[in-house]
C-alpha cells in the first residue's frame, strides 16, 4: 500500500503461535483460473501430501476451486505456517508455469490466514469451506464435489491429506450415522454464508 511521500506501508505481520489452527485462502491473480484440468488438482494435492509429512501439519478441511484455495490446518510450531504455504504455493507455481508456459503472477498477493481461536468454530469453518462449490453453483450438495475434504467425512474416502477434525466424532458414536449426520450438517444452508464470503474476500 502506497503512502504519502512515495513510500510504502509495510505488510502487517501475521500473528502466529505454536499449536494454532488457521483458515488459509489463496486466490488466482485477478481471479484467474489456477486449476485448468484434473491433473492440476491432483498435482496440488500431491504437493500438499509431501509438505504435510515434511512439516507435520494436520489438515482438517480443504476445498480446491478453479480460481482459489481454502485450507483449514493445524500447525504445532509457529514458523511452520509460512514454510508450508511458501513450499506448497511455490512448488505448484513452478509446475503451472512449466506446463502452460505461463508468464506473470499466478496468485493475487500473499495468502490470507485467519486464526481460529474458538475450538467450537472448527466444524463451522470446515462446513463453510466445503460448501464453496454449492455457493458457486457447481454442485447441489457438497459431497458431490470431487476436490474437497467433504468426501472423507461423508463417505470415508481417504485421500492422504485429511486428518479428521477432532470435533467430527461429536456427530455420532457410530461411523455410519456419523457420516450421515455430517452430510446433513454440511448440506444445510446457513444464512450468514454470503456475508462471510463478502467479508473474507474484501481485502484478498
Image: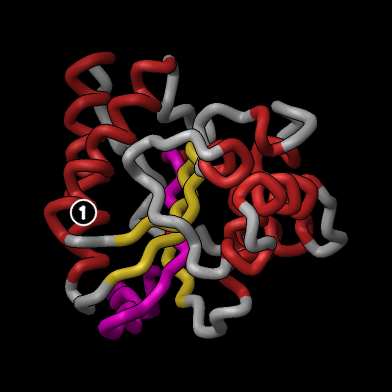
Q: Read off the residue under disc 1.
A: 86
The x and y percentages for residue 107 are 36, 43
Locate residue 79 relative to residue 23 in the image: left or right.
Answer: left
Locate residue 83 relative to residue 59 in the image: left or right.
Answer: left
Q: Based on the picture, tell me whether residue 2 belongs to the magenta stretch.
A: yes
* Residue in the image at 39% along x and 55% along y: 163
Location of residue 103 by image quarter = top left
The x and y percentages for residue 200 are 61, 62
Q: Residues within 10 Å of mark 1 (few under 14, many from 20)?
A: some
Which quarter of the image is occupied by the N terminus?
bottom left
Residue closest to the eye, 159 or 49 = 159
Q: Main secondary structure of the magenta part?
A: loop
Is residue 3 among what the camera can see?
yes
* Residue in the image at 20% along x and 77% along y: 77
Q: Based on the picture, tell me whether residue 40 belongs to the magenta stretch.
A: no
Residue 24 vertical position relative to residue 75 in the rendered view, above or below: above
Locate residue 59 relative to residue 133 in the image: left or right.
Answer: left
Residue 61 vertical position relative to residue 38 in the rendered view, above or below: below
Magenta part of the chain: 1-28
- Colour scheme shown: secondary structure
Location of residue 141 by image quarter = top right
Is residue 5 among what the camera can see?
no
Residue closest to the eye, 2 or 163 = 163
Q: How many numbered badges does the structure rendering display?
A: 1
Locate residue 80 relative to residue 35 in the image: left or right.
Answer: left
Element type at mark 1: helix
Q: Residue furthest left?
A: 54
* Residue in the image at 27% along x and 21% along y: 102
The x and y percentages for residue 63 are 51, 42
The x and y percentages for residue 69 are 46, 44
Amino acid at each position: 500500500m502506497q503512502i504519502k511521500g512515495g513510500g510504502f506501508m509495510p505488510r502487517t505481520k501475521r500473528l502466529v503461535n505454536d499449536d494454532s489452527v488457521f483458515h488459509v485462502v489463496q486466490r488466482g491473480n485477478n481471479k484467474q483460473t489456477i486449476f485448468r484440468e484434473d491433473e492440476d488438482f491432483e498435482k496440488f494435492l500431491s504437493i500438499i501430501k509431501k509438505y504435510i509429512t515434511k512439516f507435520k501439519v494436520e489438515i482438517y478441511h480443504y476445498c480446491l476451486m478453479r480460481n482459489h484455495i481454502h485450507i483449514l490446518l493445524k500447525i504445532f510450531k509457529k514458523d511452520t505456517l509460512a514454510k508450508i504455504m511458501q513450499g506448497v504455493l511455490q512448488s505448484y507455481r513452478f509446475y503451472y508455469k512449466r506446463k502452460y508456459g505461463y508468464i506473470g503472477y499466478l496468485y493475487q498477493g500473499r495468502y490470507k490466514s485467519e486464526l481460529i481461536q474458538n475450538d467450537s468454530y472448527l466444524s463451522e469453518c470446515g462446513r463453510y469451506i466445503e460448501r464453496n462449490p454449492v455457493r458457486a453453483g457447481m454442485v447441489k450438495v457438497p459431497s458431490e464435489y470431487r476436490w474437497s475434504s467433504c468426501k472423507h467425512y461423508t463417505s470415508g474416502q481417504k485421500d492422504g491429506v485429511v486428518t479428521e477434525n477432532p470435533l467430527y466424532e461429536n456427530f455420532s458414536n457410530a461411523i455410519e450415522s456419523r457420516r450421515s449426520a455430517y452430510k446433513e450438517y454440511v448440506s444445510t444452508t446457513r444464512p450468514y454464508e454470503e456475508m462471510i464470503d463478502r467479508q473474507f474476500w474484501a481485502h484478498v
